[in-house]
Amino acid sequence: MLTTQNSAKHSLDLSDPLAKLRNEFHIPADTIYLDGNSLGLLSHGVQERVARTLQQEWGNDVITSWNKHNWINLPLIVGDKIGRLIGAPAGHTVCCDSTSINLFKVLSAALQINHGRTEVLSTEDNFPTDLYMVQGLHKLLGERCTLRLVPENELLDSITSETAVVLATEVNFRTGRRLPLAELSQKAREQGALSIIDLAHSAGAMPVALLENHIDFAVGCTYKYMNAGPGAPAFLYVAPRHLEEHSKPLQPLFGWLGHAEPFAFSVDYAPAQGIRQFITGTPPILALAAVDAALDIFEGVDMADVRDKSVGLSKYWLERMAAEGLLEHMPSISPSDAAERGSQLAFEHEHAFAICQALIAEGVIADFRAPKYLRIGFSPLYNSYAEIEKAVAALAVIVHERHYQRAEFQQRGAVT
C-alpha cells in the first residue's frame, strides 16, 4: 500500500499555479485518486454547504427557504456558474435532472426546430446512454427521428443536407479523443444541421467555448471534473438564438416549474421565458447545494491553467510509463498529440480489469472500460506530479511481476 502523506514535493508541483487547490479537497489517506473523470473528490466546501443546507435551511427555516434562501432559483444560479466554465452567456444554462433526461429535452427541441429533417447523426463509439436516448425517441416518434452511426473519424465528412442533428461527445469516454467542435459546428451550419454536444468529459477539465463555436445545444454532468457528488444534477445549454426565436415550448417535458406562472396553478401549460422552460420538476435542493459549493472552487481559476496542467500530467504519465518499459506491454489507445485528447489516457491490455483491481489494492484508484482498457483520469484541481510518479511505479511492479494474475483481482462487482 502506498503512503502519500507528508511526501516530498515533485519539482513540477512547486511551480504549479493550481497546487494550493488540492488543500480544498478531502484526499483519502494513502490513496492516489485517478478516477475523477468518473467521480470527482469531495471538497471541504461541499461538506460545509450541505451541512448548512440540512441543519439551517431545511432544519430551521424549512419551507420559508424557497424564498429566504432562494431555493427556487438555484437551478438558474448554478447554471450560470457552469455557463462561465463552458463559454455560455448568462441565462442560457440550467442545472437540473440527469444528462440523459436533458439530452431527451434538447434532442426533441432540435428536431422540432429542424422539423423538415429526421436524421440524428452520431458516432459508433459515443457514450451508450446518448445513443439510447435517440433510440427511445425513435420508438416514440417513429421515422420522425432516425439514428445514423459512423466511425468517429468520419463524423465531419458524414454531415449532409439530410442531417437534422449532429450529436457528439467532445471527449470520447474510452479513448479520450477530443473532437474539433469548431469544425463540426461550422460543417453542421453549412449543411443546415443543428449541433448537440455532450460535455461530460470536458466541462471543468478544459476551456469550452459554446457561444464562440456556435453550438446549438449542450448537456453534461457535474459529478466528474466539477466534483459535485455522485448522481449530482446535470446541466443543459441552449444557444441564445433558439431561446429568442421560438415562443412555443421547445421541450416536451412540460413541468410546473417550467411554467410561466407555476404558482397560478393553471390547467393549461404556458412555457416560461428563456432557459427556465427547460426545468421540469421540483429542484433537488440538497444536491444542487452541493453543485453550487463545488463550483465555488473554480472562482478565479483560469481554465487555460487547468488545461495546461491536464496536458502536463498526462505527458508526465506517458514519460514515466516509457521509462518503466510499460508501453510495449499496454499501448496507449489515446491520441499521441495532447491537443487531440481530453484529460485522460487509456491503455490496452488483455488483463486490464485485473490490472485495475491490483492498482486499487495498492491505493491507486483508476478505472476499467470494456472490453480491455485501463483508463487514467487527471483532475488538475487536486492531482499532483508526485502522485503520477508513484502511481506509475506501482503499475510497473504489477505488470512486470504479473501481480494481476492473483485470483482476488479476477472478481467483478456490479460496477466495473
Image (cartoon, grey):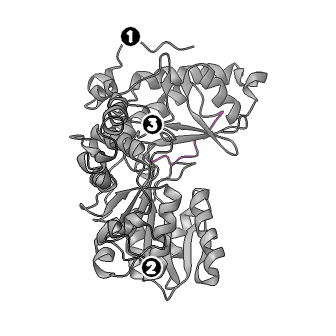
Residue 199, position as x, y percentages in the image? 43, 55
Q: Is residue 347 left or right of residue 407?
A: left
Q: Which numbered disc flags the more N-terminal residue, 2 or 1?
A: 1
Residue 296, quarter of the rendered image: top left
Residue 16, quarter of the rendered image: top left
Q: Which numbered disc flags the more N-terminal residue, 3 or 2?
A: 3
Q: CA distance from mark 3 to mark 2?
A: 34 Å
Q: CA distance from mark 2 to mark 1?
A: 54 Å
- Name the residue at 24% across, 60% down: 90
Residue at disc 1, secondary structure? loop
- Which residue bears the numbered disc 1? 6
Looking at the image, which residue sits at the far right? 407
- Quarter in which the C terminus is drawn: top right
- Which residue bears the numbered disc 3? 40
Range drawn in magenta? 329-337
- Which residue bears the numbered disc 2? 193
Whether residue 258 can be seen here:
yes
Mark seen at residue 43: none
